[in-house]
Amino acid sequence: MVGDRKRIWGWYFFDWASQPYNTLLLTFIFGPYFAEIARGYYMGAGLDEEAAKAAAQAYWGWGLAIASLSIAVLAPILGAIADGTGRRLIWVWTFSAFYVVGSFGLWWVAPGGTEGMLFWAVCLFGVGFIGMEFATIFTNALMPSLTQADDLGAISGSGFAFGYLGGLLALVIMLLFFAEGSDSGLTLLGTPPLFGLDPEAREGTRFVGPFTAIWFVIFMIPFFLWVKEPHTDRRPLHLGRAFASLRDLIRSLRYRKSLSAYLASALFYRDALNALYGFGGVYASGVLGWSIIQIGIFGIVGAVTAMVAAFVGGRVDRAIGPKPVIMASIVVLILVCLLMVGMTREGVWGIALDPASSTPDQIFFACGALIGAAGGSLQAASRTMMARHTTPDRATEAFGLYALSGKVASFMAPALIALVTTISGSQRIGIAPLVVLFLIGLVLLSFVKPKGEMPA
């Protein structure tokens, strides 16, 4: 039992180590910073401010879409290969290297850059993003071998809660000691960035890339020390057999109605959630005019509620199952997206606000808390629901399909946001497709069995 607990804690540490890619890079620090420098580039090229904001959001959206498409295509194939050989940890090692190289390289994304710099910024971010997502697939595939099925909800929720705590701590460190305000050049403590980093060159904010890479390397040590491969037969790589296994699994979906409905549902709602994370900071920067420091505080609020909700949601999941947790979370996220589409500093859906007051900021802080709480519960319960539809020996392959369901619409969601933003010329209206994607996911979820494919 001691060994089992140690293995579970090692598995938790992957969430702790990898969460800063989402918290620091995707949503709260690098994403908004990229929007700032891209906006500056486009304004320098002659666009007015609103058009430049929309162009920056569209560029970010197409970059996320391309990275997500790569994941969608390769995830089930690599999962089948991993299950075919009986090895998963070697893939975690491999894609951890992608994570570190991609995130560390963001240090060189400086202000006042060229279009070429924007291109390489998105490429490097995409390399790290692909590494994080693939490493997550193979780590998630280890979950069914950790404990009995009835405890999967609690373990999944605790893992996400632990991960959000790590992301929260990393964000607090960045805000207190490194990320500088674009006007003041000072951190949240009111001091210059540590290590003599130059605020004028935004070196404090740019340090988020190396910081994320170093964090990952340090905190993956417990994972690699304590998590061992499940006892399965090691088999040589046989591509034909791996592809045949994947083909059989895909063909079997016509007879596995609950799994098919769940993968289709997740295809829409998980990708809408990923897009909401990916564009939340960009939205706050462009629509509300927030600084990196303000967006970071917003991130702290969201991370705290996500941590608490993931932990509590895991206990609710264990008590009543993951399906009700998923449905309630989606409803909350739909309401938040509707509020964002109708919100400016001047009003919310026709209700006037004083743009000089703190009311618009307070409303969006509340949105951040709800996004964090609903998103944390949704991710943890979704992982449990997938585990209820597979077995330990086919888990990587199944979670590869799960990643596919999470990335096909993730390709579509950023692309739809980029397209609608470009057509409308409005960041607010560009968020509208997420409402539709969440609604489709909610409808499809009604066809999923609460216990998945577990014996009654």
Image: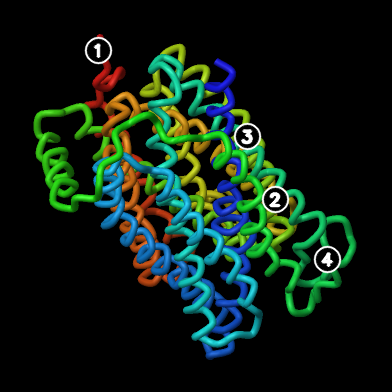
> What mark, if any, has residue 193 been given in the picture?
4
- Judging depth in this view, the residue of 252 and 335 nearest the camera is 252
Provide the secondary structure element on which disc 3 rests.
helix
Tell me if mark 1 has few (under 14), some (14-19) or many (20+) residues whose alpha carbon lies within 10 angstroms of its own: few
Q: Earlier in the sequence, mark 1 or mark 4?
A: 4
Q: Quadrant of residue 300?
A: top right
Q: Quadrant of the N terminus?
A: top right
For the point 53% across and 90% down, which residue is it?
A: 45
Judging by the rendered image, the residue that carries numbered circle 2 is 171
How far apart are labels 2 and 3 at the CA level?
Answer: 14 Å
> What mark, if any, has residue 305 been given in the picture?
3
How far apart are labels 3 and 1 at the CA level?
Answer: 34 Å
Provide the secondary structure element on which disc 4 rests.
loop
Query: Does 8 sit above or below residue 80?
Result: above
How far apart are labels 4 and 2 at the CA level?
Answer: 14 Å
- Kindly report which numbered mark, 1 or 4, lies closer to the viewer in this rendering: 1
Provide the secondary structure element on which disc 1 rests.
loop
Instruction: Give, as a three-letter code, the residue at label 2.
Output: Leu
Provide the secondary structure element on which disc 2 rests.
helix
Q: Quadrant of the C terminus?
A: top left
Tell me if mark 3 has few (under 14), some (14-19) or many (20+) residues whose alpha carbon lies within 10 angstroms of its own: many
Relative horizontal placement of residue 52, taking residue 109 as reference (left or right): left
